[in-house]
Image (cartoon, grey):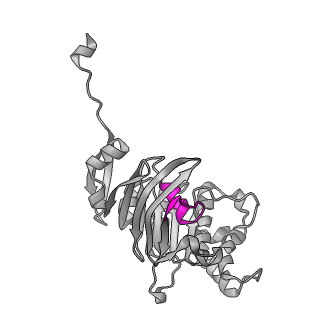
């Protein structure tokens, strides 16, 4: 299922935070949003998973206006993991993941055997099945993040929207989770369907390794877009992120990887010292 965002702008408290964004994530592709803090990544994603309504523009899934769908229909197609997605009640991990099945249940119906199996599968895929009986509030940050990813996968969506999904995860967990998402989450191989993923990432090396395309945001606007190798150039990284970057190739994947230095500050002129 493809995502098409067209001429999208967002205003909050009279201030425009996102300006005329147009982007596309093809079916089964993993598309990353990168940019400095405050560049508009999270605000844009909040419009995609309908926590915000845009001031202008549209978000479409296979041509259908997402904001015109009813909540249940939209939730069957799209699952999201926001940055702030905690709970005040101490549900068990199994109960938290089971919430992902609600869009597929009618009324207040009980979970079916199929629902329970999907939840167990999702927990196992993120390496959190041993936590099923634990209280969610007693988990570490990394454990909570894995459980919330499992809940999104248990929802069995066709589109997955992730806002900094590697927060609180150690490096091995970061690689495992992004590889899982990249491979299609819990989609069954016989279906031939892979998830379409739109994700915001701070780590540019993770973004370069796992994403098919990147959109670079700065000041609420897209300033570059394309494959990671074409987008993550030293000039762009200096201008947008304020760093000096050295590009190398990953020895196994061949993906571009980056080593960073601070930009050199110009030496003061002699006149300034006199």
x and y percentages locating residue 53 in the rendered image: 57, 61
Question: Does the stretch in magenta take in 56?
Answer: yes
Residue at 49 percent of width and 67 percent of height:
58
* Residue bounds of the magenta highlight: 41-57
Q: Is residue 101 visible?
A: no
How many numbered marks does the figure carry?
0
Q: In the picture, residue 123 is in which quadrant?
A: bottom right
x and y percentages locating residue 210 in the rendered image: 39, 65
**In the depicted view, which residue is nearer to us: 206 or 30?**
30
Residue at 64 percent of width and 55 percent of height:
140
Q: In the picture, residue 70 is in which quadrant?
A: bottom right
Work out which residue is located at the far top of the displayed protein and give it.
274
Q: Is residue 269 above or below residue 115?
A: above
**In the depicted view, which residue is nearer to us: 147 or 31?**
31
**In the depicted view, which residue is nearer to us: 61 or 114?**
61
**In the depicted view, which residue is nearer to us: 209 or 100?**
100
Question: Does the stretch in magenta take in 109?
Answer: no
Q: Is residue 58 visible?
A: yes
Q: Is residue 120 above or below residue 248?
A: below
Work out which residue is located at the far left of the displayed protein and give it.
270
Residue at 41 percent of width and 51 percent of height:
35
**Quarter of the picture holding the C terminus:** top left
x and y percentages locating residue 151 in the rendered image: 62, 70
x and y percentages locating residue 238 in the rendered image: 31, 44
Question: As drawn, is 72 to the left or to the right of 174?
Answer: right
Residue at 56 percent of width and 54 percent of height:
168
């Amino acid at each position: 299922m493809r995502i098409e965002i067209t001429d999208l702008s967002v205003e909050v408290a009279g201030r425009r935070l996102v300006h005329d964004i147009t982007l596309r994530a093809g079916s089964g592709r993993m598309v990353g949003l990168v940019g400095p803090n405050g560049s508009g990544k999270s605000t844009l994603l909040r419009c995609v998973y309908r926590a915000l309504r845009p001031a202008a523009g549209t978000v479409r899934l296979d041509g259908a206006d997402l904001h015109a769908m009813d909540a249940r229909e939209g939730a069957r197609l799209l699952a999201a993991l926001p940055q702030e997605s905690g709970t005040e009640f101490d549900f068990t991990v199994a109960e938290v993941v089971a919430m992902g099945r609600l869009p597929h249940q009618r009324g207040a119906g009980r979970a079916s055997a199929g629902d329970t199996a999907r939840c167990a599968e999702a927990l196992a895929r993120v390496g959190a099945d041993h936590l099923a009986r634990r209280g969610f509030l007693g988990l570490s940050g990394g454990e909570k993040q894995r459980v919330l990813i499992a809940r999104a996968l248990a929802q069995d969506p066709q589109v997955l929207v992730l806002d900094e999904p590697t927060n609180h995860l150690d490096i091995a967990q970061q690689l495992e989770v992004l590889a899982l998402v990249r491979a299609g989450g819990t989609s069954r191989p016989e279906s031939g369907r892979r998830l379409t993923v739109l994700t915001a990432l701070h780590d540019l090396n993770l973004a370069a390794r796992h994403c098919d395309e990147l959109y670079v945001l700065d000041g609420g606007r897209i300033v570059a877009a394309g494959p990671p190798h074409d987008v993550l150039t030293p000039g762009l990284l200096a201008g947008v992120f304020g760093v000096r970057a050295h590009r190398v190739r990953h020895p196994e994947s061949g993906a571009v990887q980056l080593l960073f230095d601070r930009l050199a500050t110009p030496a003061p002129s002699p006149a300034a010292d006199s």
